[in-house]
Image (spheres, rainbow, N blue to C red):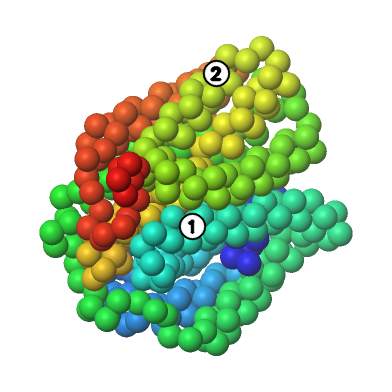
Amino acid sequence: MRGFCDGLIAVLLPLHFAALGFGPGGLGLFASAALSGSALMTLMVGRYAGGIGYRPALQGAAVLMFCSGAAFLLSDQLWVLCAIAFVGTLNPSGGDVSVFAPIEHAVLAGSGDVRDRPGLFARYGFVGTVGAALGALAAGPVERLAPDGGPGAAFVFYALAGALTFVLYRGLCPFPISTAIAAPLGPSRAPIRRLAALFSLDSLAGGLVIDTLIAAWLYQRFEATAALVGVFFFLTRLCSACSYFVSARLAGRLGLVRTMVFTHLPANALLVAAAFAPDLGLTLLLLGLRSLLSQMDVPARTAYVMSIVTPEERPAAASLTAVPRSLAAALSPGISGWLLGLSTFGWPLVLAGSMKIAYDLTLWRLFRHVEPIESGATSRPPSPDS
């Protein structure tokens, strides 16, 4: 449900800002405020969620979601909208970068056997990605059915979804989390900080090629139609969602780090190659193939972070690895827009792919021998005797 709202808002938000008379600069400022606020909120959650309990923390986030959708309808001033974005849960990226994510990651990490963890995170990512894809697809009908109030209707739906989310969380049984008291990072501080730095590099590169900027490049270079680009993004998100389950199987066979690196590297090579494609058909083919691989590292990455820390460190680890990603992703869209203004060539794709390849190689060098704390975690393939 939350993914559906994020996908819907990500598509209709530019229309809302245009109706209010704000240009791309205002939209960019809003996105930076939203991602920065999300990072700060995520940091606070990592520090305090274990103390107040995961379910109350999730219910509080649901209340914030309701207030964000409702408040967004009450003002047409840019500074007010940016303030709402900073303290609320509105997500302009379409991906799951909200305050909900680190809490839910910590809850999932404490659910079930350690061998099932990659599959749990795969299903979690699959549901969220499919929801975002359906939300993006629904944006067109919503805009056509309510051309004067389509974006406003989306924010009403967002607020109602927040209220329903609160009720659903309230009705759940207590989460099966560790009885250990949540604590700041202790023995795992050094590897988690290194991972946070690497994930920041990956997110900085990812911000160069978010969907909005890829669409702008396709319009600019190939004069693609909005209908074609919309269907393309819907299909690529579905491909990404299906890839989560392949990732879980690969993690069981190859190990978590190998799955992260060996699927991400070819995806980034395809991203660079797409910049050099001479026509729209080949470009969409390369980007489509990339979508089959580019998200396979996500469930493996999350499972790996949760596996190399103690149970009481999980909220802090989830927060420390999520916050820098949000901050880094907020910096690079402006750089990408500047590059697109200089040339129709896909320099953002080349730069992003190169940075991501550097991330993959560094991750492999630093963490291929770092074993999970828990017995049974899939850090590497089982030996022939196992």
* Amino acid of disc 2: Ala
In terms of secondary structure, where does tag 2 sit? helix
Residue 9's place in the image compared with 164, above or below, is above
* Amino acid of disc 1: Gly
Q: Position of residue 363 (x, y in %)?
A: 29, 36
Q: Quadrant of residue 213?
A: top right
**Residue 148 visible, this orientation:** no
Q: Nearer the viewer, mark 1 or mark 2?
A: 1
Question: Viewer-proximal residue, 341 or 318?
Answer: 318
Residue 171's place in the image compared with 303, above or below, is below
Residue at 52% across / 84% down in the picture? 172
Left or right: where 77 falls relative to 329: right
Name the disc covering residue 178, or none.
none
Left or right: where 160 falls relative to 335: right
In terms of secondary structure, where does tag 1 sit? helix
Q: Position of residue 379 (x, y in %)?
A: 31, 47
Q: Earlier in the sequence, mark 1 or mark 2?
A: 1
Residue at 80% across / 38% down in the picture? 227
Q: Position of residue 97 (x, y in %)?
A: 46, 56
Which residue is farthest right?
Answer: 145
Residue 376's place in the image compared with 182, above or below, is above
Q: Position of residue 130 (x, y in %)?
A: 65, 54
Which residue is farthest left?
Answer: 187
Q: Which residue is mark 1?
A: 119
Left or right: where 144 falls relative to 18: right
Name the disc covering residue 273, or none.
2
How many residues crowd around disc 1 within 10 Å: few (fewer than 14), some, or many (20 or more)? many
Question: Viewer-proximal residue, 222 or 29?
Answer: 222
Give the spatial CA distance, label 1 vs label 2: 31 Å
Residue at 22% across / 45% down in the picture? 370
